[in-house]
Amino acid sequence: MRDPLSVLTEAFTAFLFGKVETTRLPVRTSTGQAQAVYLPTAAPGLGDSGVIIGREVYSGKGYIYDPFQLYGQQLPAPHWLVLGESGNGKSALEKTYVLRQLRFRDRQVVVLDAQGEDGVGEWNLIAQELGITPIRLDPMAALNDGIRLNPLDPSITTTGQLALLRTIIEVAMGHGLDERSGFALKVAHAYVNQTITDRQPVLTDIVEQLRHPEPESASAMNVDIDDVRAWGLDVALVLDRLVDGDLRGMFDGPTTVGIDLDAPLIVFDLSHIDRNSIAMPILMAIVGVWLEHTWIRPDRKKRIFLVEEAWHIINSPFVAQLFQRLLKFGRRLGLSFVAVVHHLSDVVDGAAAREAAAILKMASTRTIYAQKADEARATGRVLGLPRWAVEIIPTLTPGIAVWDVNGNVQVVKHLVTEAERPLVYTDRAMTESSVPDDIQAAEWEAEQRAALIEQQMNESSQSTVA
């Protein structure tokens, strides 16, 4: 029994100051309130329309992305940049993304496949699965009735043809054309287009006209014929490489008949071209301009143009200028350009820094796989990534990347289905006898751990007996 004086004291204190203790009410919350408290797991998603990429690492939510669905509201441009070291999952992401996009009937994809193994491009398996024959550009095969793309194809406007010819020459020479050489090229191109009407003009015609210009072409501009010949000599020597040099056969004849530009997937296999030679940017320029004038049409189809080893485009000021125009048209014509690059330093520290910055600015979606710490910091500065994302990039494991979709930054784990797995992984030679997926990896690790414990127990028992 409590002391009456204590009871009276507590009652008087409560009367003056209120109760000393209050009853704690039960905590009640809603999903919205919980998300507001745990902001890292509650960043807004990208909607529920498009293709499934995987899941957000921190929240576990499914991650769905589609530039065509997001364009206009969340994306100012539908173009996409993919960065990262080799072996971290870029190729798997590209291929599953394309396979999932092709499930929509109004989607069409062109791939410039610059890597390969076993004599074919990386996309060969997917092309076979879809019943598609890749367009293999190979100088040796071209000499034996292989695939040809004509830079002077009548489907390309005369302005486009001249711009493409200038780009080919400037890439090969490593500098821009001076006024006199540009004038000689312009005169030769105009004469060839005006006089050859019974067939497709070809590069051989341009080279011949540069070497032997017509007097009337020079006199019309009040220029001496010998001057025109001298001005065009260097240009003729550069184009001669495509006509009679190591690149002959691919571009010095009429465009091959029968290239199916209505197929859902069009693969240009460039794996037989030396990736480090000047031929690769020339090849990409020709393919890009040819596609611009023959493939992209103002219909309702949504088109994806995916370029591997895209630094050949972005790092060349002359090729980049051609593709900048293509990217600008992409907004109006439903084109999403996907550039896959290993290192951002490959494209921002070269001669085409200004052109590279312009193309990067058009890429409203950026996906960054694991990079070294210094490379991650440089990437973060160029792309304007938040500090926490820059710090996490060096710690990312294969298959996980930082996604920046116009400022919406998430860490996303890419998921590959069992049906897709044999088609998308390019390191089969390294993994067929190893550990192909996460589940088997965990089982393998558990087996190794059990074997180690057993070995230690055996060693312990042997030492005890001894």
Image (cartoon, grey):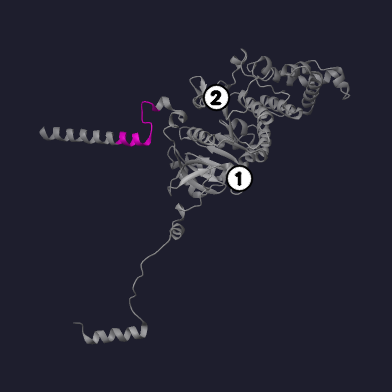
**Above or below: residue 45 compared with residue 396:** below
Tell me what residue is drawn at x 85 percent, y 21 percent: 217
Quarter of the image with the N terminus in it: bottom left
Displayed quadrant of residue 311: top right
**Above or below: residue 232 compared with residue 4:** above
Q: How many marks?
A: 2
Whether residue 107 is visible here, answered yes or no, is yes
Which percent across, then down, holds residue 179? 78, 28
Reading the chain from its start, which is encountered first: label 2 or label 1?
A: 1
Check disc 1 and report its element: helix, strand or loop: loop
Q: CA distance from mark 2 to mark 1?
A: 30 Å
Quarter of the image with the C terminus in it: top left
- Camera-near label (2 vs 1) is 2
Check disc 2 and report its element: helix, strand or loop: loop
Which percent across, then down, holds residue 373? 47, 41
Please provide the residue range marked out in magenta: 431-445
Displayed quadrant of residue 285: top right
Q: Is 347 positioned to the left or the right of 100 in the image?
A: right
> Circle 2 is placed at which residue position?
132
Tell me what residue is drawn at x 56 percent, y 42 percent: 365
Displayed quadrant of residue 282: top right
Magenta-colored stretch includes residue 438: yes
> Circle 1 is placed at which residue position?
71
Q: Main secondary structure of the magenta part?
A: helix
